[in-house]
Image (cartoon, rainbow, N blue to C red):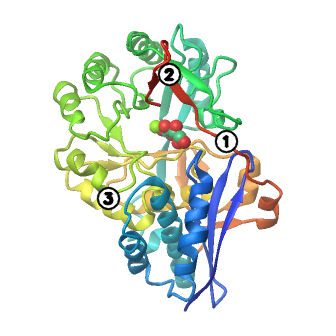
């Protein structure tokens, strides 16, 4: 079997998605997600100009060797552009192999370790009453676990929430230039305990609650926050501090037992070495799409399992249904599954990417279609071309650029 074609398809059914489609001489096709939100075209060029020529004529069954060739053979390792491109190839090859076997991908990963995949949804509000309404809406949709984000008094736009209407952060990027959010760490640290108090008193102690600090705190601030919110029994506190400096998490860990989740911006296992070896976190958050694909994700989870750390694959709207499908197959198969982030996609996106996975009663299932179980409607995709878009940036009130 040989790869005879590999094409990059860019479509924007409401937001941009980059998909690699690989075709074999037997006519089997595989899809991989290469969407890097706000920097999509860099990955398109990396794939089209530098990777596709290497794939033509090769054996699609040699997944590990292809991965190593793209990773080691380029000499220039790691980084989100490289790893998103490799992820798309790796995922598409797993899709092909599973289709050739006539099995859903999770069967090739060891089979199901559970019946269904628990998820969490996003609740956002400009203020606490609006957030409580949003939590009610997620519960009505069937979610059993909810991430809570609110506006902070005195700030116009903060992560997950906009001054005008409460919208998901993923929508903010659909504009010509970056939206500028404002930030005041002191105001946030004073506000968050009140938010969690209000949510707990409205919904009781049993609802699993999550919160994303979106890399905005120093280790000292995160340690202080963790101690203060322990009594609200969070499922996790996410990205409490930028984790390029993994040692920063030591301070946080020494001071609080709040579970910690990190890794959505990581792209190789080396980003996690200290965090996992020293058990400084509880959940690894990488996306299949940004971490080099199914192959390294599986290795990451096995490594994390040695320290009782669980999976929590990144799954916002900027992961396409192709990346989401790959995540759900892994979720069903790995033993140390924790939770899957899931906000769904627009109806149009679901038409462009018809998928076998289903969401029911707050849980996902990958379905039983061979491969990933996703078909791309190329004609429909072509009717929704790329739209230039950026993620927001974040500035302190004196204008200093802050972490986003
Ligand atoms: O593209 C950026 C988003 O993926 C990110 O802001 C979403 O933090 C996020 C999350 O936890 O889903
Ligand atoms: Mg996050």
Q: Which residue is mark 3?
A: 300
Say the numbered circle drawn on residue 395: 2
Residue 270 picture quarter: bottom left
Q: Earlier in the sequence, mark 3 or mark 2?
A: 3
Percent coordinates x, y for residue 218 in the rendering: 30, 25
369 lies above or below 338: below
* Ligand 1 within 8 Å of the CB at mark 1: no
Say the numbered circle drawn on residue 389: 1
**Residues at circles 1 and 2 in contact by the CB criterion of under 8 Å:** no
Mark 3 or 2: in front is 2
Q: Earlier in the sequence, mark 1 or mark 2?
A: 1
Say the numbered circle drawn on residue 343: none
Q: Earlier in the sequence, mark 3 or mark 1?
A: 3
In the image, 27: left or right of 110? right
Mark 1 residue element: loop
Q: Who's the residue at 55% across and 64% down the image?
A: 46
Percent coordinates x, y for residue 131 in the rendering: 57, 19
223 lies above or below 386: above
For the residue pair 72 and 159, the one nearer the viewer reads as 72
């Amino acid at each position: 079997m040989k790869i005879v074609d590999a094409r990059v398809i860019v479509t924007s059914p409401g937001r941009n998605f980059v998909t690699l489609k690989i075709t074999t001489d037997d006519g089997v096709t595989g899809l991989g997600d290469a969407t890097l939100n706000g920097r999509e075209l860099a990955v398109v060029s990396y794939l089209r100009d530098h990777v596709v020529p290497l794939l033509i004529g090769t054996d699609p069954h040699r997944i590990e060797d292809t991965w190593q060739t793209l990773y080691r053979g380029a000499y220039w390792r790691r980084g989100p552009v490289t790893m998103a491109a490799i992820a798309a190839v790796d995922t598409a090859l797993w899709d092909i192999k599973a289709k050739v076997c006539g099995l859903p991908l999770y069967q090739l990963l060891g089979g199901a370790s559970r019946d269904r995949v628990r998820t969490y949804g996003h609740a956002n509000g400009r203020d606490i009453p609006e957030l409580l309404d949003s939590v009610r809406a997620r519960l009505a949709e069937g979610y059993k676990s909810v991430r809570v984000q609110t506006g902070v008094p005195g700030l116009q736009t903060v992560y997950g929430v906009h001054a005008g209407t409460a919208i998901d952060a993923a929508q903010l990027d659909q504009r010509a230039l970056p939206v500028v959010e404002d930030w005041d760490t002191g105001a946030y640290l004073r506000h968050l305990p009140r938010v969690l108090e209000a949510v707990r008193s409205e919904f009781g102690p049993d609802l699993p609650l999550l919160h994303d600090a979106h890399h905005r705190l120093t280790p000292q601030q995160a340690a202080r926050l963790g101690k203060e919110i322990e009594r609200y029994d969070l499922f996790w506190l996410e990205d409490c501090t930028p984790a390029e400096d993994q040692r920063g998490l030591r301070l946080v860990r020494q001071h609080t037992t709040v579970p910690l989740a990190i890794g959505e911006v990581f792209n190789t296992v080396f980003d996690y070495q200290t965090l996992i070896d020293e058990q400084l976190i509880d959940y690894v958050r990488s996306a299949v799409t940004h971490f080099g694909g199914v192959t390294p994700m599986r290795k990451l989870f096995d490594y994390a399992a040695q320290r009782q750390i669980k999976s929590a694959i990144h799954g916002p709207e900027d992961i396409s249904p192709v990346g989401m499908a790959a995540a759900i197959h892994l979720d069903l198969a790995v033993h140390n599954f924790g939770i899957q982030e899931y906000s769904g996609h627009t109806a149009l996106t679901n038409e462009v990417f018809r998928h076998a996975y289903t969401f029911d009663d707050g849980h996902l299932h990958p379905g039983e279609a061979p491969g990933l179980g996703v078909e791309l409607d190329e004609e429909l995709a072509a009717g929704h071309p790329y739209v230039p878009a950026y993620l927001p940036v974040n500035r302190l009130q004196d204008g200093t650029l802050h972490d986003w």
